[in-house]
Image (cartoon, rainbow, N blue to C red):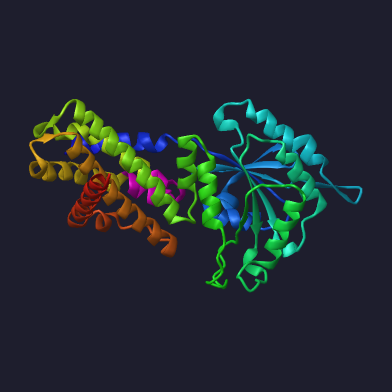
Amino acid sequence: MEKLDKQFEEQFEAELAKVTRPNLMIVGGTGVGKSSLINYIFGKAVAKTGTGEPITRGVERYSDPKVPLNIFDTEGYEIADGEISTANFQTRILPEIRKRRHDALEEQIHLIWYCLSVGNHRITDFDLDNLRLLSEEHKLPIAIVLTQCDTEAVDDDGNGVTSQEFRRVLKAAGLSFPVFDTCSDNPNRDPELELDLEKLLEWSAQALDDEALRASFVGAQLASLPLKRKEAMKVISAYSATTAASAGLNPVPMSDALLIVPQQIAMAASLAKIYGFGAMEASVMSLLKGQLVTLVGRQVAASLTKFVPILGQLINAGVAAAITGGIGWALTQAYESALRNYLETGEAPDWAKLLSHDMFMQAVKAGMSRVAKAEAEV
């Protein structure tokens, strides 16, 4: 078992290290609520403890080793002779975007959020000018993010009065970017107020056509558990297919059941990244690489040795997919519970409880039933 623990920990850490960070550029003037929004979505570490690195005048990159994402913060305008000017945007920010387009993938700007505050009650001419300039950058996914929408008045249909006016102004200006109403974490906001934070995150994830970038973005954001669950289901499906293909080519005898464990280790690490454990405190990561690694490794092995005799003496394609899907489902339940508890209390997860043998096996069984039901419906 010690050998298995060591193998699991080494591969788990290797998988966690495989991170390609998306570069998100945030454009907007001072006071539009960019920092509050970013802190809420990606965790306070980005804005409060992230290290700012000046890139060019008006552009600063924020990176934090615990968050798999880089933030490029820009103001997009400057004051010259008492007048607001977009010269900085035209001469420095846009050239920076274009220059990076020819760099390696990890250096390119991958997403742009242009933030406008409904609290300002108007869209300025320089914002419209900047957006027109951005409209020429056809290859970049660009969204208009309306901030502080929890503070605006709503009409009889429950729509924000100012945000609807902003949409009319943008349409009249010929700007057809997707627009999302958002706010930061405000415990006093009307619970009936429906905003677009989930839609913004979903759109952003889908706009990243590189799988590694999308997975990192989903892992970095802490505001949407449904988005994490959706990405986790994709990962489980992919690894179930991989183990099924391996077992289909060469059915694995029960005595060699642990031969397919490496793929399930990789799945466990991929799911851990989606749930953003790298964005938590060092103490949490220490538990993740210690107690969690040992528990998951043993539970994966136990799942195989327990369920293979029931399903047959050979791990064929169907058996491999069922077991891998069950393990993936069990891990998703544990990771999601851990993250929800962390977000609510700030306390490190109790991995021993979340991954206790009985609870884990029950979750594996439930996951296997889900896989069987899905296959029957196909």
x and y, in percent, of residue 218 in the image: 47, 46
> Can the viewer see residue 322?
yes
Q: Give the range drawn in magenta.
A: 273-289
Query: Residue at coordinates 43% horizontally, 64% vertically from top-left?
Result: 344
Asked if residue 353 is positioned above or below residue 153 in the image, the reply reads above
Predominant SS along the magenta part: helix
x and y, in percent, of residue 99 in the image: 68, 28
Q: Quadrant of residue 121?
A: bottom right
Quadrant occupied by the C terminus: top left
Asked if residue 133 is positioned above or below residue 146 in the image, the reply reads above
> Can the viewer see residue 67?
no
Asked if residue 294 is positioned above or below residue 17 in the image, the reply reads below
In this image, 33 relative to 215: left or right? Answer: right
Q: In which quarter of the image is residue 123?
A: bottom right
x and y, in percent, of residue 260 in the image: 21, 33
Please tell me how many numbered marks the rendered image carries.
0
Judging depth in this view, the residue of 65 and 266 nearest the camera is 266
Judging depth in this view, the residue of 236 and 344 nearest the camera is 236
